[in-house]
Amino acid sequence: MKKLSTIPVQLSIACAVILLSLSTARAQEIHLHVPHFAGSHYEWKIFQGKQELTVRSGEISPDGRVILTMPDPYQDYRGMTRWLLKKGGGLDMIYTGKGFSVECLSEKPNSDNIIYTGNPENDYLESHHSRQQTILGKLGAVNHLLQVYAPDENLHKIALDEQTHLRQAFSQVQADRAESLLYAARFGKIVDFTKGIADKIYDNPEDHTTYFNDFVTHTLDFKDLYTSGHWDQVLHHWVMMNIRSGKGDHAFIERMESAMSRMNQDNILAAFAEKAVPLLVEKGKDDLLPAIADHLENRPAVQAALSGSVKNMMASVKMLTGKKAPDLVFHAPVRTQTKTSAEDIIIKTGNLDAAHTILLFYQGECPLCENTLIDLANKYQQLKEQNVRVIAISADMTDQGFEDKLIYHQWPDNYCDFTGMAVENFTKYGVLGVPTLFLLNQEGVVVKKTAMMDELMEILDKKKPF
């Protein structure tokens, strides 16, 4: 009888590891079959914050087949991916580290003829979206009936009952999604945020806004957002929501700190700073930057990952609110409303002879600045009646740039010394972007810094005599 040779234990283990690796590799493959697009060039992209990274590219085989595998540096990637054809079109597919297949035998792909196999994520996304949209569509029709029929008509009562039923159904669909562990469920909530769809139907717009604000502040998983393809849009809406809120800067700082405390990964916190810091500067809210800087203080990897421009913005913050405003100094030659002065002009902020003074830092070629100039011009008569002085400081480098915007200047105090933004007045006031507005009181103390005229008018309106 022949003896079976003994395989060394080490070799058995090595073979098992190799087989397991091969099995895992196959399990992570995405098989696409799109025969009508054979020979087309494609790119496979992933999302990291606001960036789209191409991780694979090539041509579809003559029989219309493609096999995609995630490159080694991105093996831990979990999120939305985008497969694009050079000639146009493509697919958005959720990737969670598991293989699946996609087939479309039509030359005109749509949600009905694109078949996913082995991908519960995309199946869930499609089915939940369909249920949600069906309910919302019916709600729209019912709401229309409630407007058309009077409360004493029978159809109004029927429509009211149906509205209640549909609202309950919608809330249940959203509650069911909250119980799901799939990435697709969390991704769906992100997409809903971008479309203004909440967890239930709110009658009060303020409650609607509070839900979205709380969602980002306390609930949203920033790792999911980072790989969703909606990073920029969601954060932009959230920051602007808080800037426009009537609850003030302190409430926004608390929300920012709460959100940042949940950003445990350095790349995610760095991406947040890259988005939030320039937006806050643009909107004249750089007084809020120290809250971000304090949070980054013990995160050296995050600080190292920031771009040079964001680092400069954070290092240049000057906190002037509640302090005496620096005097304004314009070095000759200085262009004014009516002439060019051959001598320096100095404006002492402690002697402005007005109940309040608005300082506008702007640049002629800036579209947002032009909007502010128009807004200020429209409100100037009202400001004069309130004894408010307006002083405009231009960052224009040419006489023509300054001249082009004089049409809006109904106030006499307009100054430009053609030295741009990197000079004395802009530096002393810590102006990092334009337009920037300061409101000074009678003693020349800074009351408010912002980029929005409405915020200053709100303060001034409260100070109107009865």
Image (cartoon, rainbow, N blue to C red):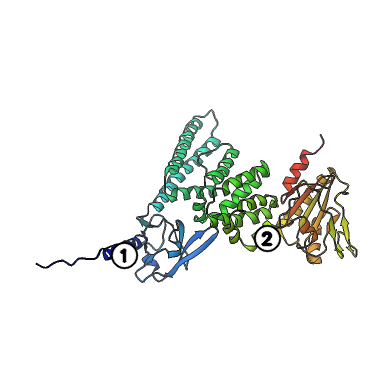
- Secondary structure under tag 2 reads helix
Disc 2 target residue: 312
Residue 71 seen anywhere in this rendered image of the structure:
no
In the figure, is residue 356 to the left or right of 120? right
The quarter of the image holding the N terminus is bottom left
- Secondary structure under tag 1 reads helix
Disc 1 target residue: 18
Residue 247 seen anywhere in this rendered image of the structure:
yes
For residue 253, which numbered disc appears in the image? none
Q: Earlier in the sequence, mark 2 or mark 1?
A: 1
- The kind of residue on which mark 1 rests is Ile
Q: Is residue 381 above or below residue 98?
A: above
Q: Is residue 249 above or below residue 299?
A: above
Q: Quadrant of residue 178?
A: top left
Contact, mark 2 vs mark 1 (Cβ under 8 Å): no
Relative image position of residue 243 (x, y in whole percent): 66, 47
Relative image position of residue 377 (x, y in whole percent): 79, 51
Q: Is residue 122 above or below residue 34?
A: above
Relative image position of residue 461 (x, y in whole percent): 77, 40
